[in-house]
Image: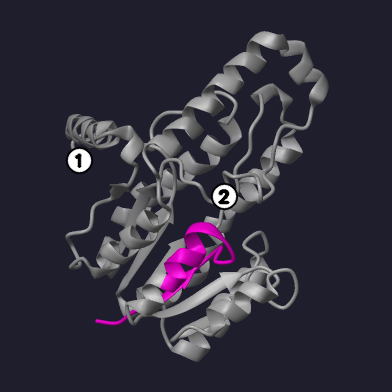
Amino acid sequence: MKKTILITGTSTGFGKLMTITLSKAGHTVIAAMREPQEKNAAVARELSALPNVDVIEMDITSDDSVNKGIAESLARHKKIDVLVNNAGVTGFGLFEAFSTEQIRKMLEVNLYGVVRTYQAVLPSMRKNRNGLIINITTGASGFTLPFMVPYFISKFAVETITEGVQEELRQFSIENVSIQSGVYPTEMNNGTKAGIHSDKPAITEAYGEEAAKIFQSIGAGLFGKMAEFKMDPQVIADGVLSLINMEKGTRPLRYPLDAIAQGTDKEFIHARAEIKSRWLKNYGQ
């Protein structure tokens, strides 16, 4: 059955590939992006030329922009069957070297952007008693790395939303899934898309050469593995399509798509679910 799907952050990376992939599969895609008439005009024209693709303007850091975009989409398409929260930004640096303002900027995109889209789309999904929300997070969803703490704070928060609202929304037949994507060669990681990085150079300097070496080692390891495993962003777009095609009630809460993890991400997720089950049982749930 063909779906109406709204995707955030479609001007580059995963979001653009998702739009192309889902359009080819015959779905109606509402491709949300910032500045489709200005900075992103070329990609907006490219995607608009695809069958059943409706490019809309949406800045997920703005309540008004999100509410307007979703309201206009509902008026035009009558429903949104699937929401894909893909838009995001990364950033690197020592935690102490991030100002609170930089961390706030990170959360505005990666966390509050998701909050805004949920709150804007849920009333219509509840009314229709149907819906699927897919959130793009990171890693195995339960551990962090140095020099990326604000980024992981934002992504773990989205995992909390996904898991918590799954039960809240069950009575309305609205499902939630998070995709743990790992490291892929998209604009977010190849340096062509600006990130939100630490902004206190004096603090960074105070940590000295040892911290710099650790940072360089982690970066070399991650990007080296990305090349070794030939990570292809199309895997994430295909994963979204697979989730959409799954029968209702069979979709997993977490959907890891990270070849570099070599199965350890799946082990971690399963172990976490089993421990939570026992914890809930001890609390009489």
Residue nearer the viewer, 7 or 217 = 217
Across and down, in percent, residue 161 comes to 42, 49
Position above or below: 72 against 109: below
Q: Is residue 117 left or right of residue 66?
A: left
Assign a secondary structure to mark 2: helix
The span picked out in magenta is 1-20
Residue nearer the viewer, 266 or 263 = 263
Tell me the residue at 44%/38% (across/down).
Answer: 227
Across and down, in percent, residue 253 comes to 28, 50
Queried whether the magenta region covers residue 198, the answer comes back as no
Name the residue carrying label 2.
110
In which quadrant is the C terminus drawn? top left
Name the residue carrying label 1.
285
Tell me the residue at 53%/51% (across/down).
Answer: 186
Queried whether the magenta region covers residue 5, the answer comes back as yes
Across and down, in percent, residue 102 comes to 72, 39
Q: Earlier in the sequence, mark 2 or mark 1?
A: 2
Q: CA distance from mark 2 to mark 1?
A: 31 Å
Number of on-image labels: 2
Tell me the residue at 35%/35% (across/down).
Answer: 260
In which quadrant is the N terminus drawn? bottom left
The amino acid pointed to by label 1 is: Gln
Colour scheme in the image? one colour
Judge the density around disc 1: few (<14), some (14-19), many (≥20) Cα neighbours within 10 Å: few
Q: Residue furthest right?
A: 202
